[in-house]
Amino acid sequence: MGNNTYQIRLIAVACSLSVLCLSGMYFAARFNSMQIGNIHRVLLNGKATTTKSLKTVHQSSQYFEINGTSKSNEKTAMTKILLLTYYRGGSSFLGQIFAQNIEAFYWFEPLDSVDLTMSNDFIRKKDGLYLVDTDYKLLKNNSLGELPEKVIDPRTQTLIKTLTCKATALSQSTLSGKFFRAGQGMPRFRPYMQCLDKTRQHKYKLCAQILEKVCLNSSIVAVKVIRYPMYDVHHLVEIIPDLKVIHYVRDPRGIIMSRSLIHGWSGDNLAKNARYLCLKMAKNMKAFKILQDQNRNNYLLLKYEELAMKTEETIRKIYQFIGHKMPTNLLKWIEQNTKAKTMDWTYGTRRNSKETVFKWRKRIKKIDMKTVTDQCISILKTFDYQI
């Protein structure tokens, strides 16, 4: 009898705990739902609304559906693309090829704010590990404990998060970076920017949930970087084996000419910057060849001049490389933006591309042409540019 009473009491306690757990799970789910609901409400000027009505508002752009439902019944596998290029290398045009695709999610320079943070935090490299200053001091004092075999640097971490649509895991500095301000005109960023405006306090992490859903609902995620070396791409490939990489290059003399117009380089300063650029391009190309030998289907070398002179043909080549059909609306966009006489985008996409591609040859001084050519002779031959 005593044993039966004891067993009954145990069952009663277990049931009580189960009820408490279920209640906790219920209220946690309700709290999370309320947080998402708050985003929905602030987007409509503080008025309570349903997901359906919010979806109706957002559908006016015809670029996304906030509830995470694909526009088609079957969701295709997401293709992840890294566009690795150079400052003043004509990459704005390349980026727009993906930004104008309503099925693609295009991240524009997400490493801009990361580089600033890295320089401010003073990162040291020890035995192949990237450590922020605080970690380095702890390591010296033997108080850090055992480090993992591999410490991924902040730039690689950010790229993995952007390529896999983990927007809520991004730092606030990235979520508020120049990349988003420059991308305000891109329809797929509008709900995120609207959310920030409506919250007034700019709740980045909360609004990033919207950004994440739009990204996850895309069939293509493309990220353009000018601040990431090709020899670090293998870190990305370890996490994302099917990553597609486009190495986008331009005649270094055209790049240096474009940069010097902004920075006023000449003489030794011009030579130093040309030498640095071409050394960087050579290192990137060496790493690119190694990666390409390992998996030729996932790496594409592309020239700015090729895209500017044979635009439609080259865009078809790009889409064939990533395994997607070229969107029909891109043909109209190509016509409007490669033969235009005026600029209409902050980073200079709209112009007559065929007139622009070799314009630097008419502007560059003979002495500067010789200076840059001498510094870049090896890489000019590698990319088969006219000397």
Image: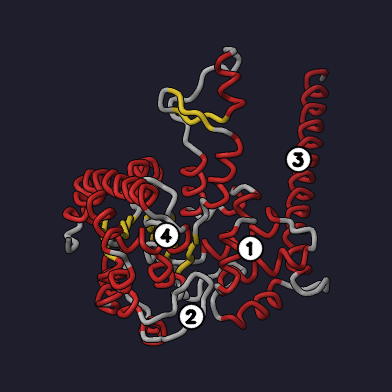
Tag 3: Cα neighbours inside 10 Å, few (<14), some, or many (≥20)? few
Tag 4: Cα neighbours inside 10 Å, few (<14), some, or many (≥20)? some
Marked residue nearer the N-terminal end (3 or 1): 3
Please identify, in this view, whether the residue under mark 2 or under mark 1 is nearer the observer: 2
Picture quarter with the C terminus: bottom left
Front residue of this view, candidates 207 and 350: 350
Distance CA(mark 4)–CA(mark 3): 62 Å
Distance CA(mark 3)–CA(mark 1): 30 Å
The residue identified by callout 1 is 210
Is the C-beta separation of discs 3 and 2 under 8 Å? no
The three-letter amino acid code for the residue at tag 2 is: Met
The three-letter amino acid code for the residue at tag 3 is: Cys
Front residue of this view, candidates 130 and 147: 130
Distance CA(mark 4)–CA(mark 2): 19 Å
Please identify, in this view, whether the residue under mark 4 or under mark 2 is nearer the observer: 4
Please identify, in this view, whether the residue under mark 4 or under mark 3 is nearer the observer: 4
The residue identified by callout 2 is 343
Q: Is residue 112 left or right of residue 336?
A: right
Distance CA(mark 1)–CA(mark 4): 37 Å
The three-letter amino acid code for the residue at tag 1 is: Ile
Task: Identify the image quadrant of residue 372.
Answer: bottom left
The residue identified by callout 4 is 259
Residue in view at x 33 percent, y 42 percent = 231
Is residue 295 visible to the viewer in this orientation of the structure? no
Marked residue nearer the N-terminal end (1 or 4): 1
Is the C-beta separation of discs 1 and 4 under 8 Å? no
The residue identified by callout 3 is 21
The local secondary structure at tag 3 comes to helix
Tag 1: Cα neighbours inside 10 Å, few (<14), some, or many (≥20)? many
Front residue of this view, candidates 368 and 332: 368
Rendered position, 182 above or below 35: below
Distance CA(mark 2)–CA(mark 1): 31 Å
